[in-house]
Image (tube, rainbow, N blue to C red):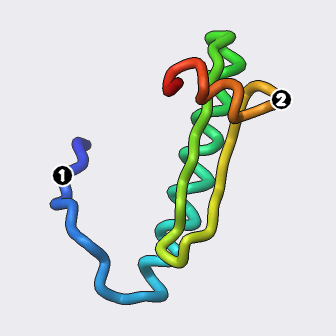
């Protein structure tokens, strides 16, 4: 069976939005890790929550060195 497309729109319920953010954040960071391992690529992901909390992943030891290569 083929899944139908869902329309992307803001989740109005605050609790549901936070749960969705947490699940998708974990999935995104896991995919970034997998990409770095499988392709031996340098990967950096920075995510800010609605409340301003920082979540990050870097395949190298120092995330700022990796970012500075592409954004001098």
Left or right of 12 in this view: 29: right
Pinpoint residue 18: horizontal percent, then vertical percent. Answer: 51, 77
Q: Which residue is drawn at 44% across and 82% down?
A: 16
Outermost residue, right side: 61
Question: In front here: 63 or 71?
Answer: 71
Locate the N terminus and report the quarter of the image it occupies: top left
Question: Distance of mark 2 from mark 1, alpha carbons?
Answer: 40 Å
Where is residue 28 drawn, in percent x and y?
54, 45
Which label is found at residue 72? Answer: none
- Picture coordinates of residue 34 (x, y %)? 65, 27
Residue 27, relative to residue 66: is it above or below? below
Q: Measuring 50% from the left and 66% from the top, which residue is drawn there?
A: 21
Q: Badge 2 local density, few (<14 within 10 Å), some, or many (20+)?
A: few
Q: Is residue 23 above or below residue 52?
A: above
Mark nearest the camera among 2 and 1 is: 2
Give whichever of discs 2 and 1 has the lower sequence position. Answer: 1
For residue 4, the mark is 1
């Amino acid at each position: 069976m083929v899944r139908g497309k869902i329309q992307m729109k803001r989740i109005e319920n605050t609790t549901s939005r936070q749960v969705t953010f947490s699940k998708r954040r974990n999935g995104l960071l896991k995919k970034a890790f997998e990409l770095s391992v499988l392709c031996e690529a340098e990967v950096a992901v920075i995510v800010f929550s609605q409340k301003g909390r920082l979540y990050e992943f870097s395949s190298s030891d120092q995330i700022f060195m990796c970012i500075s290569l592409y954004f001098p």
